[in-house]
Image (cartoon, rainbow, N blue to C red):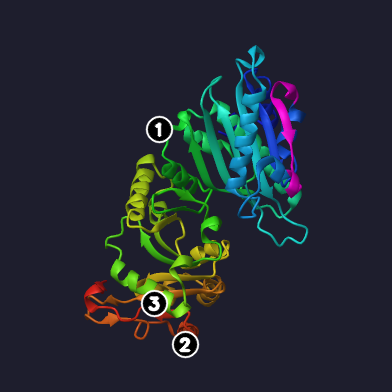
Amino acid sequence: MLNDIPETKRKALKINLDPTIYGTFAEIGAGQEVARNFFTAGAASGTIAKTMSAYDMVFSNEIYGAELSGRYVSKSRLNRMLSHEFDLLAERLDGKLYDRRRFFSFANTVTTLNYNKTNDPHGWVGIRFQSEPHGEANDIIIHIRLLDSDSSLQQNVLGVLGVNLVYAAFFLTDDVQLMIESLVHNLSVGSVEIDLINLKGPVFKNVNDCLVNLYLIAKGFSSAAIFNEIAEIQQSKDLLYKKNIMILRTKFRQKSIPNFDLFNRAVEQFKRTEGIDDSNLIVLIEVLMSNRFDQQTEISRSDLEEFAKRAQELSATGNHVIVSNFSRNHKLAQYLAKCSPSSVGISTNIANLKKIFDSNQYEKNYTDELLSYISDLFSKNVKLYAYPYLNKDNKEIITTANMPVSPQAKPLYDFLILNNYITDIESYDTKDVKTI
């Protein structure tokens, strides 16, 4: 219940008054927003050993080392900050005075909205902490996107979220779901997106990282999670930036097996027509959560375990897997556009494409909705690769050439076909065509 959520100041004060919690704050990019909340709450000397902000790159590199990628808002930078600051605590704070202390290092590296509002405000936030004195360290690392349209509001969000993270680390690790939900306490809906979380250490030894990241989608904190070939969570832009992406869309528990034969042909066609080298290609298999959301408002742990199992099975095929709640292609395209890819190919069944250009599938304003859909889908170098199906009634193979299209949508459809925004998968074997 909302009334049970402590205010940010009360959370910070509870931490400050706990004689066992002691550590450092290192913040880069948005001011010392988190540390400020602890100072203004009172009694901060009981908690804070040091705060710092190394904004200049030379100073930052001298302290934490240079980043080979040249990127300072990165997971690598955050890990360097956490390790350096935590190791200093153990090295410098030794003796009886600190015997009962549970040390922590909190760090963030964030970019907020610039003056011209042309950047993508996001960042990495994390804490390394001991659950008991002299104990092994634990990590909570998250990636966030700041969604407010004002930099001062974004700074405030970061400050509140940071307090929530420190509080969760010391008081809520026994209930991981509650711990995750608490990260957005006292924040407005739509002010932040949490699209990745990593948990490590003895207090999380029984926690499945895959399940945790799927829970972010179930709770609406994120819209998708991407896993690599060994089912490890990946940050979307880190993985997909400037890459060529080919994606196969599948629904959870769909009746038919995904048509991998035709999908493989689509991948080869995408590489050939776009002049793509394997080294710059990311192949994704998507598992949609949306059909489960349509059936019920709450997704149970058993549901999440099934999604995790499916993601791990598909990862084992040697492909990256994305689990999402994108019910339609244009939502997927918008999500991928934020990652600034070079090009995107979406493999889809003609049966799904037919619904887009069928006016009977829309309740009202069909032409307006269709134009909006097409604009969102194809404005960022996206192409659809459509694989055929066999009509069970007349045994006819349906392709883009003979697919039924509503009359008012026909000119737009013809334009997309003529300009290769939508293309058939070529040279397929009729035995691979599924009946619908």
How many numbered marks have been drawn onto this rendered protein structure? 3
Q: Nearer the viewer, mark 2 or mark 3?
A: 3
Asked whether 96 or 223 is in front, the reply is 96
Query: Taking the image as drawn, is residue 85 in sight?
Result: yes
Tell me the quarter of the picture where residue 267 sits.
bottom left
What residue did someone put label 2 on? Answer: 418
Magenta-span inclusion, residue 46:
yes
Residue 94 at what x, y percent from top left?
Answer: 64, 18
Q: Residues within 10 Å of mark 1 (few under 14, many from 20)?
A: few
Label 2, label 3: how far apart the Cα atoms are: 17 Å
- Image quadrant where residue 102 sits: top right
Badge 1 marks a residue whose secondary structure is: loop
Front position in the image: 69 or 131: 69
Residue matched to label 1: 206
The foreground one among 77 and 62 is 62
Q: Is 58 displayed left or right of 204 in the figure?
A: right
Q: Give the farthest residue toward the top.
A: 96
Which kind of residue does numbered mark 3 sit on? Gln
